[in-house]
Amino acid sequence: MALKYSNKINKIRSIALGLVFAGMIIMYIGLFFRETEWLMLSFMILGVLAIGLSTVIYFWIGMLSTRAVPVECPSCGKQTKMLGRVDACMFCKEPLTLDKDLEGKEFDEKYNSKQYQKEQES
Ligand SMILES: [Zn+2]
């Protein structure tokens, strides 16, 4: 079963990669406004900000990875990393959980939310 949901670390990584490209495209667009200095400068600054932000995100992924739990995917047998109570395999998107109570239940991202956990406890 293909999930719309994908592995969190992979997802964040693709956002960061997207930002690098966005930053480059923004700076490239800026070159078209060479005659209007302030406009070109604004594009350049925006581009640099996007790339700077992606660097921060990459740094954040690095920190998240150290907290991620390495598990062997029961479906494809590869080593994957998961974050939170529920996550998906990086390779085959098999839903994974660390929580025995959630085993066999339909995959839902809400299990990761703090609000939901609070509701369950009360
Ligand atoms: Zn897998």
Image: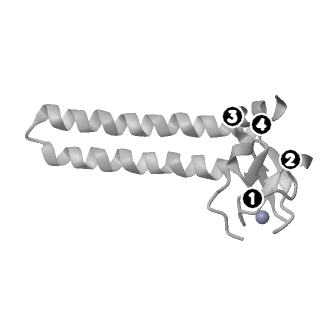
Q: Say whether disc 4 or disc 2 marks the residue closer to the N-terminus.
A: 4
Q: Nearer the viewer, mark 3 or mark 1?
A: 1
Q: Residues within 10 Å of mark 3 (few under 14, many from 20)?
A: few
Q: Residue at x 26, y 49 (%)?
A: 28
The answer to whether mark 1 is within 8 Å of ligand 1 is yes
Q: According to the image, label 2 marks what residue?
A: 98
Q: Nearer the viewer, mark 3 or mark 2?
A: 2
Amino acid at pointer 1: Cys
Using residue 45 as the reference point, say whether residue 109 is left or right of it: right
Q: Do the numbered discs 3 and 4 sit on residues whose CB atoms are within 8 Å? A: yes
Q: How is the image coloured?
A: one colour
Q: Say whether disc 3 or disc 1 marks the residue closer to the N-terminus.
A: 3
Distance between the alpha carbons at the discs numbered 3 and 1: 19 Å
Q: Say whether disc 1 or disc 2 marks the residue closer to the N-terminus.
A: 1
Q: SS class of the residue under badge 4?
A: helix
Distance between the alpha carbons at the discs numbered 3 and 4: 7 Å
Q: Do the numbered discs 3 and 1 sit on residues whose CB atoms are within 8 Å? A: no
Q: According to the image, label 1 marks what residue?
A: 89
Q: According to the image, label 3 marks what residue?
A: 63
Amino acid at pointer 2: Leu
**Residue 72 location, x and y as percent?**
86, 58
Distance between the alpha carbons at the discs numbered 1 and 2: 12 Å
Q: Say whether disc 1 or disc 4 marks the residue closer to the N-terminus.
A: 4
Amino acid at pointer 3: Met
Q: According to the image, label 4 marks what residue?
A: 67
Distance between the alpha carbons at the discs numbered 1 and 4: 16 Å
Q: Residues within 10 Å of mark 4 (few under 14, many from 20)?
A: few
**Residue 104 location, x and y as percent?**
86, 59
Q: SS class of the residue under badge 1?
A: loop
Amino acid at pointer 4: Arg
